Image (spheres, coloured by chain):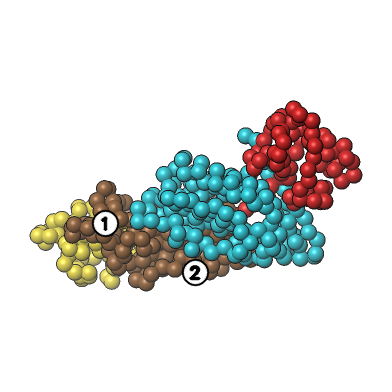
Chain colours: A cyan, B red, C brown, D yellow
């Protein structure tokens, strides 16, 4: 049972990730995709550029997944975050969880995305349709 | 990373610090350089060797310190 | 915005369902799959046969999805339940939800699977590895 | 459906009821037939014309009544 956590410049194949998590003892499988939207705070968005402190991000994602696995009875999990330039409709992040029972899959999936947004050293820069660009900083992470 | 890259104008740099220095000393030393470094917050979130760390963390020869702007992944 | 709810004998393609739900204003997409497990109550399971009062089931699924849509701000949703004989590892049900923000996708998805299990006129018969078969009846539905 | 199919030995059947009959009367009438019908619960969950309905629901000519065993979808 090895969980998969990585940062990549390649497009994310959520279905393949999910399939890779499901084993014969699992009764539930849940795939979350974060997708680039065409607007934010009322401004039209044309693309997003994601940057990451990749080696640390993979380590933090691994810690988050380990926390989820110790907290809920789940099977295999996979978390992938994409970096580079993404267009509207493209997945920026995928979280796949398989588990014997559904409740744990929902809990673990939700935990991973919430913690990822708080702690993973990853940043998005919005490219607006009018040509302006801006780094977003939503959560201040830190020693815990 | 992100907005801090524009402050440093580089991804990485080496800084010499006296023995017994902590992460906060590094922040102070860099901010003294003035110009764009003044935009580095006095108490930035930071990581030492890939782990989030407090400003009071002692630094040793070869440690990798990263200043982490507010994150926005997902 | 038309939601999709149906019962089918064909294998379920979860990724296609999810992709069909996502539009440019969505920032989150969630796919739940119920999968046939190799055991239940400690007994090894070889296959499941699903039966449904299909026309009513589709109607009930449509009602559940409409309830979720009115309760949470979500985009398009799709719910598909398979009937007939399924082997271990095959999805029996898929619930796809796209939404502008992630919290609503999780809430709506969870609501649909919980209500489906309570109200949809669908039944599973477990085929154990030892050759015995048994209809399961977990939830007594009724007029509300 | 499911276990009830084995009671009825059929998917559908037509039953004549007096005017003013309710769903409960149909249940009682079927259970009187004895044999496997005795295994139909006295108060089964049921649907009239594709909607869950109470035992007190009045029935009219042409209504489709379905007895719904405990469900186990998902």
Asked if D55 appears above or below C83 in the picture, the reply is above
Q: Residue at x 28, y 61 (%)?
A: C48
Q: Nearer the viewer, residue B26 or A91?
A: B26
Can you identify the residue that label 2 sits on? C16
Q: Nearer the viewer, residue C31 or A54?
A: A54
Q: Nearer the viewer, residue B18 or A60?
A: B18
Q: Does the rendering let one see residue A8?
A: yes
Q: Quadrant of residue C117?
A: bottom left
Front disc: 2 or 1: 1
Q: Does the rendering let one see residue C104?
A: no
Task: Label 1: state its secondary structure.
Answer: strand
Bin the neighbour count of mark 1 within 10 Å (Cα to Cα): few under 14, some 14-19, many 20 and up.
Answer: many
Chain letter for mark 1: C
Asked if A104 appears above or below C65 in the picture, the reply is above
Asked if A102 appears above or below D2 in the picture, the reply is above
User: Is there CB contact under 8 Å for labels 2 and 1?
Assistant: no
| Image x and y of residue A75, in percent | 42, 50
Can you identify the residue that label 1 sits on? C45
Quadrant position of the N terminus of chain D in the picture? bottom left
Chain letter for mark 2: C
| Image x and y of residue B2, in percent | 75, 51
Q: Residue at x 73, y 56 (%)?
A: A125
């Amino acid at each position: 049972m090895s969980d998969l956590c990585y940062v990549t410049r390649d497009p994310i194949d959520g279905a393949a990730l999910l399939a890779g998590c499901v084993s014969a003892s699992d009764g539930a499988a849940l795939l979350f995709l974060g997708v680039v939207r065409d607007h934010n705070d009322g401004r039209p968005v044309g693309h997003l550029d994601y940057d990451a402190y990749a080696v640390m991000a993979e380590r933090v994602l691994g810690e988050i997944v380990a926390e989820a696995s110790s907290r809920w009875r789940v099977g295999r999990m996979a978390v992938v975050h994409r970096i580079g330039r993404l267009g509207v409709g493209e997945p920026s992040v995928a979280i796949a969880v398989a588990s014997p029972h559904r409740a744990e899959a929902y809990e673990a999936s939700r935990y991973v995305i919430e913690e990822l947004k708080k702690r993973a050293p990853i940043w998005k820069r919005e490219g607006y349709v009018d040509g302006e660009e801006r780094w977003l900083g939503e959560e201040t992470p830190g020693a815990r | 990373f992100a907005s801090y890259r524009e402050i440093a104008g580089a991804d990485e740099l080496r800084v010499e610090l006296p023995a017994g220095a902590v992460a906060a000393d590094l922040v102070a030393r860099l901010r003294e350089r003035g110009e764009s470094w003044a935009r580095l917050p006095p108490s930035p979130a930071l990581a030492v060797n890939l782990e989030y760390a407090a400003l009071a963390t002692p630094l040793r020869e070869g440690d990798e310190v990263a200043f982490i702007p507010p994150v926005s992944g997902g």
